[in-house]
Image (cartoon, helix red, strand yellow):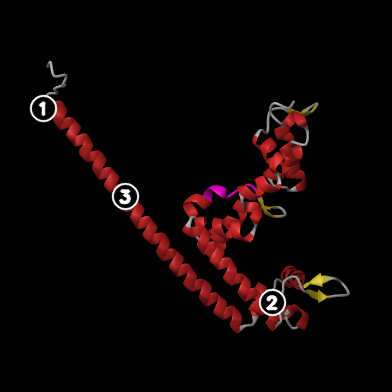
Amino acid sequence: ESSGLKFIDMNEYNSKVKEIDIVTKKIALGESMFERAVADIKSMDAEREQYVQEKSKLTASLDLDRFCHMCLWSKSQQITCASRVKALQRTYDTPRHTAMMSAMKKESCRKSDEDMEKRARQEKRKKAKEAEQMEHWAEKKKDFCAECEWEEGKTCVERVNFLNERYLIPRERAKATAMVESNECKFSHQKKAHGPQEEKLANFCPQCQWGPHLTCQQRVEYLMYTYKVTQRKAKLDAIQKPTCVKGRA
């Protein structure tokens, strides 16, 4: 006893040994499940890539890879090829690919060889950037801005959801793709491009008064509902009022 050591009876000792054994088994089970999940994701990614390649071959066999969305189907009416496809789908319930082939009967809706080569180079650069992102993803993923705008009216997380649901791209890979496609999906870009605004955004005060009978959060919800803008964009608008920024009221 004078040595400072604490002795426990055998029952308590055996109980603690059992607890340790249970926890050790749970950890082993968790690690095993994690390894299986990682293996499944890799397998799904490889399978998805096979489908993507097969789709590309089928699309190329029909010349659909030459479809030019933003080219003009009608110069006089300023109708793009993509708009023509939507019109056929909406008016005649024409399947999308059939509508695309119909629009491509106009030479203006077909990409030239030069355009195809340019696109191939762009795709190659894009894949290289995606691979680089994934190689350092543990660090890069912190830069992903879910609520930032990938394009007008669509957030980065909505783009991720689309890639995941439409093309079965794993969510983390889809995030990397969104960041490659648009710098707007990076916090680092947002801070560089909109530094002061980002600081205000971090101090957004939802319960503060935007107007006599409207809180800042209510103003955000109004803008989102009325103009179909993203929450982030609505907040950026709301913080133009100093009262919507903590410490600046």
Magenta extent: 141-148
Q: Name the quadrant containing residue 14.
A: top left
Identify which residue is drawn at 22% across, 37% down.
20
Magenta stretch encompasses residue 222: no
The answer to which of marks 2 and 3 sits earlier in the sequence is: 3
* Residue 120: % across, % down: 61, 75
* Residue 80: % across, % down: 78, 71
Name the quadrant of the C terminus. Answer: top right
Label 2 sits on residue: 67
Work out whether residue 215 can be spotted. Answer: no
Label 3 sits on residue: 31
Tag 2–tag 3 contact (CB < 8 Å): no
Q: How far apart are marks 2 and 1 (CA)?
A: 78 Å
Amino acid at pointer 2: Phe
What kind of element bears circle 2? Answer: loop
Mark nearer the viewer, 2 or 3: 3
Amino acid at pointer 1: Met
Q: Distance between the residues labelled 3 and 1?
A: 31 Å
What kind of element bears circle 1? Answer: helix
The answer to which of marks 2 and 1 sits earlier in the sequence is: 1
Nearer to me, 83 or 144: 144
Amino acid at pointer 3: Glu
Identify which residue is drawn at 69% across, 74% down.
94
Residue farthest along the top direction in this orientation = 2
Tag 3–tag 1 contact (CB < 8 Å): no
Q: Name the quadrant containing residue 201.
A: top right
Name the quadrant of the N terminus. Answer: top left
Identify which residue is drawn at 49% across, 54% down.
137
Magenta stretch encompasses residue 147: yes
Label 1 sits on residue: 10
Identify which residue is drawn at 64% across, 36% down.
202
